[in-house]
Image (tube, rainbow, N blue to C red):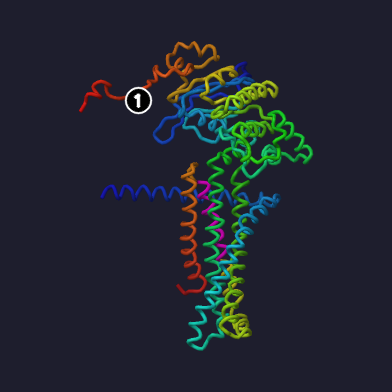
Amino acid sequence: MLHYFETLGRSTRENFAKLGRATFFLLLTLQGIPDILPRLSLLIKQLYSVGVLSILIISISGLFVGMVLGLQGYYVLSDFGADETLGLMVAASLVRELGPVVSALLFAGRAGSALTAEIGLMKATEQLSGMEMMAVDPVRRIITPRFLAGLMSLPLLAAMFSAIGIMGGHIVGVGMLGVDDGAYWSQMQASIDFYDDILNGVIKSVAFGFVVSWIALFEGYDTLPTSEGVSRATTRTVVNSAFSVLALDFILTALMFGDI
Amino acid sequence: MTELNKNTLISIKNLGFSRGNKHIFDNITLDIPRGKITAIMGPSGTGKTTLLKLIGGQLQPEQGSVTVDQQNVHQLKPSQLYSLRKKMGMLFQSGALLTDLSVFENVAFPLREHSHLSESMIRTLVLMKLHAVGLRGARDLMPSELSGGMARRVALARAIALDPMMIMYDEPFTGQDPISMGVLVHLIKSLNTSLGLTSIIVSHDVQETAEIADLIYVIADGKVIDHGEPNALMNSSSAWVQQFMHGSADGPVHFHYPAPDYHSDLLTT
């Protein structure tokens, strides 16, 4: 029994210490932002590897998620004779929820894990220490550009996910199941609100981009400098990011749409 | 300034450092003379690399001070520490080359970060540094295409890119074939002379290090056991130092891990 409390106490203390390190790390990362402006090439390189290289997985997943939404939505809505509102249903689901959330989960798996592994390996091979000894701050030079790239990429990727998903819903709903083309678009146009739906979705994906990039970079930076340490850190990035995104989604949804 | 201060580049006084419950350094004091090659030797796990990190300000000591070029490293502001580090080169055991940059870009890295030189000037400087380590022809290779010895030579070119006053070598000879080892020994010696550097070599390769070092400190169990010129240490009065310098299998450091008496152990049923 005592052993149980001991373990609980130790892990609680370690987790709080880690949270402290993570917060301090975030502050250092944010402090480096003004240094990026004169060196945009660093950011552009990372936007390519974090953002552009994630486009394929986001596009294909968006297409399939949209197609499934079209199919499922049609069967439910047609029972009530409301199949003309399919466009609205697909778009609202994507723009409000699935676009930001699913693209954040995919982003954590594709770009987040890559960031952790990259930073972790740089630590394990003493590249970060080497930079410090060359009087170059590794947080400013390596971490901040990657953080900004993650923050900027995810909202754009989420927008692509939603747009392609809406196309997917159209292919299935209008192309295969015979929903009226005009109704699909006009219902969507009439009911999707720029502020309530689109802007809230964008705010969500910015928050997710912030959290996923922070977790991925911190896990890499805080890893034990061994191959085992790096592989564990990579797993933790994906698990913690997924958990944080889903929990944060509930909180943001409650704040934006609910009366909780 | 006294004569001693003028000739001493790094002065470590009463340094104490521990990791967890393990005391790595227990009140050690040593001076590293300017313009010389000083070796810090000792068995694996005695914290030789930790000492370099303390000198470079990457770790904080628990007690004592490290003074480099008249500046107390651990009392400097971050900006002052960074300007001091520009004058310190460090060669890591793995080379620590940036894996996403070519050999040329790795050597150019500190120049691009800390100077506003024109591209043609950077090119000239990088080629000069690479020429000094014999790898001018390897400028377009990526770090993954280099052998361990070549990677260390590129890292050495990068370490001298900003014309530092000193270089710290972390186990430069470990895992090298005889030819690469010979090249590195020669390079460390010749660069120290031609560039007027102060070199600190952390190593446990006795022969290679003793060949080029002007002064050797032997560290074990968190203390400086002995120091002096290589020849003097080879004939040290300490049995421990004798065993270490000559690599004898048995001596004060026993060949056998502590165990019960051999014969009675065998006869135990």
- Amino acid carrying mark 1 in the image: Tyr
Give x and y (percent) for residue B146: 63, 36
**In the figure, residue B145 lies in which quadrant?**
top right
Q: Residue at x 52, y 78 (%)?
A: A71
Q: Is residue B189 visible?
A: yes
Magenta stretch: includes residue A143:
no
Name the side, left or right, on which B258 lies relative to B142: left
Indicate the secondary structure of the residue bearing disc 1: loop
Q: Relative to the observer, which residue lies in front, A234 or A27?
A: A234
Q: Relative to the observer, which residue lies in front, A170 or B58?
A: A170
Q: Residue furthest bottom?
A: A81
The prevailing secondary structure element of the residues shown in magenta is: helix
Give x and y (percent) for residue B71: 60, 29
Give x and y (percent) for residue A207: 55, 62
Q: Residue at x 74, y 34 (%)?
A: B127
Q: Relative to the observer, which residue lies in front, B193 or A181?
A: A181
Q: Residue at x 42, y 50 (%)?
A: A15
* Residue denoted by label 1: B257
**In the figure, residue B110 lies in which quadrant?**
top right
Magenta stretch: includes residue A221:
yes
Q: Residue at x 41, y 47 (%)?
A: A14
Q: Which residues are magenta?
A: A204-222
Q: How many marks?
A: 1
- The chain letter under disc 1 is B
Where's the C terminus of chain A, which quadrant?
bottom left
Give x and y (percent) for residue B179: 61, 25
Q: Is residue A211 visible?
A: no
